Image (tube, rainbow, N blue to C red):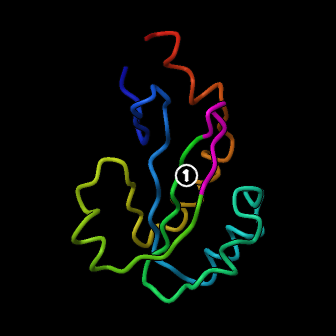
Amino acid sequence: MKVYNCFKDSKGYLVPKSAIIRNNHEIIEWLSSNKIQYFFNDKPNTLNLDKEYLCIGISHSWSGYIYTHASTISQEYIDQYLIDNPYIKLFGDDYEGFKKYMTWVSTLGPWFTKQLFKHV
């Protein structure tokens, strides 16, 4: 079974890739005020946002619910550690693609993350 923009973790859950986007004020506002705000609860506005990129880490709970965390990273860190990482989706300056991806992630739940359990 091939699933795009996702990976199967060591526990058998299907997890969307974490997202990296160039940091700017508009994307922070969008994350904080859009329908996906329950992911962040205004957290991006309280972060130290002094680096070039915003990384949205995506994970899951034991019951399969998706949750996220936000942090900033530098271009040097991306070049050194993340450029070929299969668990990261790099968006660069593609803000519309990032918004579409994060909106999709916000709709997922245990029905998605646990879908491979019946096949194991």
Indicate the quadrant where residue 120 lies: top left
Majority secondary structure of the magenta segment? loop
Nearer-the-camera pick, 33 or 115: 115
Verify whether residue 67 appears in magenta. yes
Identify the residue at image location x=58%, y=41%.
Answer: 60
Q: How many marks?
A: 1
Identify the residue at image location x=39%, y=31%.
Answer: 10
Verify whether residue 46 appears in magenta. no
Question: Which residue is disc 1 drawn over?
Answer: 101
Residue at the limit of the structure toward the bottom, as seen here = 50
Secondary element type, mark 1 = helix
> Which x, y percent locates residue 22?
45, 76
Indicate the quadrant where residue 46 lies: bottom right
> Which x, y percent locates residue 67?
63, 49
- Which span is picked out in magenta? 61-68
Report whether 31 appears left or right of 49: right
Report whether 55 appears left or right of 106: left
> Which x, y percent locates residue 38?
77, 56
Nearer-the-camera pick, 63 or 54: 63
> Which x, y percent locates residue 39?
70, 56
Residue type at the position of mark 1: Tyr
Residue 64 vs 68, above or below: the answer is above
**Which corner quadrant holds the N terminus?**
top left
Identify the residue at image location x=69%, y=70%.
Answer: 30
How crowded pointer 1 is (Cα within 10 Å; few <14, some 14-19, many 20+) is rated as some
